[in-house]
Amino acid sequence: MQCYVFFGIQGSGKGTQAKFLSERTGFQHVNIGDLLREQVALDTELGNEVSRIIEVGDLVSDDVIYKLIGDSFCPGCKGVVFDGFPRNIAQAEFLMEHFEVKRVFFLNLDQEKAIARISSRRVCSSCGLNYNLVSDVPSKKGVCDDCGGKLVVRDDDKPAAIARRFKKFYKRTFALRDFFETRGLLSEVDASMGIEEVSAAINAIVDSISSN
Ligand code: AMP
């Protein structure tokens, strides 16, 4: 199966851009963080196993991630946009073995800008819908447009967890840049630009691959 991959530090906008690309290509958007949080919200066995790990910003074990990915595809899905996977070299090798990787986008953003963006993120405590107090503002302050639930800061968006997640990113995930560069699959995009500009840069790269 064909796939595109997005990686970058938290706040780099990979979720937003992965969603855009999935809408444009008709590929399924697979956001591993959302799949994990869904398991936690549903109070499943897996959810209970991973909730503490997610809360403190550690990485969930590779086997759990592979199982989750295997269970996540829609029937008839023609391709996938991965967001939050792979997150280490072992996962990248798994990806190369099981998928045809069309392009890997590294959304590059410095930590200060990322922190400013993360501090404006909110999530609905009932249905899990994401908001942003700058770019995706709810109609009524602190309340979910969809279900009326209370909007809160995600536990893993709190300062201590963020610091830990950044550290994890540079320790484990940053190595993906070399891994995919060596294989001729990497495109680095300046994620400090506005959402539309980043999206245009990504679309131009995707179009240039398709026309080759
Ligand atoms: P995210 O919303 O993508 O930042 O993911 C939230 C949390 O889910 C991360 O901090 C990790 O604990 C876990 N997680 C998401 N994707 C992965 C992955 N590919 N491998 C291991 N853990 C992951």
Image (tube, helix red, strand yellow):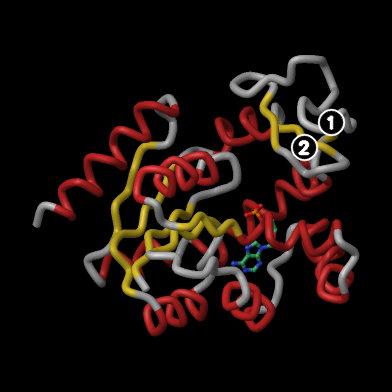
Instruction: Quadrant for the C terminus, please.
Output: bottom left
Which mark identifies residue 123?
A: 2
Q: Earlier in the sequence, mark 2 or mark 1?
A: 2
Quadrant of the picture in which ligand 1 is shown: bottom right
Position of 182 with respect to 11 (left or right) is: left
- In depth, the one of 162 and 22 nearer the eye is 22
Local crowd size for mark 1, using a 10 Å CA cut-off: few (<14), some (14–19), many (≥20): many
The kind of residue on which mark 1 rests is: Leu
Q: CA distance from mark 2 to mark 1?
A: 5 Å
Relative depth, front residue between 143 and 114:
143
Q: Residue at x 42, y 59 (%)?
A: 5
Q: Nearer the viewer, residue 81 or 93?
A: 81
Q: Look at mark 1 in the image and give the residue it sits on.
A: 151
Where, by quadrant of the figure, is residue 204 drawn? top left
Image location (x, y in percent) of residue 14: 50, 45
Coordinates of residue 175 in the picture (x, y in percent): 44, 66
